[in-house]
Amino acid sequence: MMRRAKPLRQQFAQLSLILFGSCLLAFAYYHINFQNHLSEGGFVGLALLAKYGFNLPPAATMLVLDIPLFIMAWLLKGRQFIWNTILASLAFSGFYELFERFSPIVINLSDYMPVASLLSGVLTGLATGIVLRFGAATGGDDIMSVLLSKYTGLSIGTIFLLLDCMVLSLSFLYLPVKEVLYTILAVLIASRVINWTIGKGTTEEEENVHGPVRGVSTSHR
């Protein structure tokens, strides 16, 4: 039996929340992480490692890492998840570029790095959780977390934490220890917020909107 298309209002709400999450994530990465020199985990962190270790261009490294996961997600999660993910990825890049070029906001927390870690963890975790909850991802490492969560039974936040910590542990080779440790603290907070955002208050009606996220472990509830 063919699956019924979602009502237009429901589709609009889903896409609006994906865009909101992408905007919030870009805001947090630029105004908190970048402005306060927090390092990066995930595929961005791997791309930076490849640049420092082998002088490979980060954009090319990201492309090589992303493409296989997009193909896997297309096969395992479906076409709609991929279209939503493309939208979220483009929106994140666009919003980040706008903030970088035009935002007058400067959040300098260099003397209060625990606060920077807390804000980064809460905002990036909330933003990532919203995007995932409403059936999209913002990049290949998000897709990997969704797929590994589905097939390992671990929550998405736990997978994020494990992947980011593995990458950040290698970052000790070229980044200041203090910077990496504060980033790990931010990742720890973000993993908890992602789990809470995805699992908080899910109802049967919401499940109709979250289609692509269904099947992900909710053992964190």
Image (cartoon, rainbow, N blue to C red):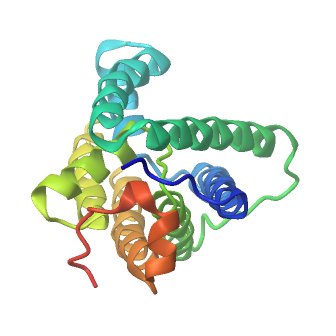
Kindly give the residue lying farthest to the front in the view shown.
1
Locate residue 46: give its quadrant.
Answer: top left
At 30% from the left edge and 14% from the top edge, which residue is drawn?
A: 54
Residue furthest to the left = 152
Q: State the quadrant of the C terminus.
A: bottom left
Question: Residue 40: x, y in percent?
Answer: 43, 46
The x, y position of residue 128, in whole percent, is 49, 59
Asked if residue 168 can be seen in this view, the reply is no
Please report the residue visible at 38 percent of the width from the left and 78 percent of the height from the top: 199
Taking depth in this image into account, of 27 and 83 the one nearest to the observer is 83
Q: Count the numbered circles shown.
A: 0
The answer to whether residue 82 is seen in the rendering is yes
Q: Can you tell which quarter of the image residue 100 is in?
A: top right
Q: Is residue 54 above or below residue 219?
A: above
Q: Is residue 130 left or right of residue 56?
A: right
Q: How far across and down, in percent of the image, does residue 170 sit?
A: 23, 41
176 over 21 or under it: above or below: above
Q: Nearer the viewer, residue 33 or 13?
A: 13
Residue at position x 49%, y 50% in the image: 136
In this rendering, position of residue 174 left or right of residue 57: left
In the rendered view, tell whether residue 2 sits above or below residue 55: below
Q: Is residue 78 left or right of residue 215?
A: right
Q: Is residue 123 above or below residue 200?
A: above
Closer to us: 191 or 176 = 191
Residue 129 horizontal/vertical position (percent): 47, 65
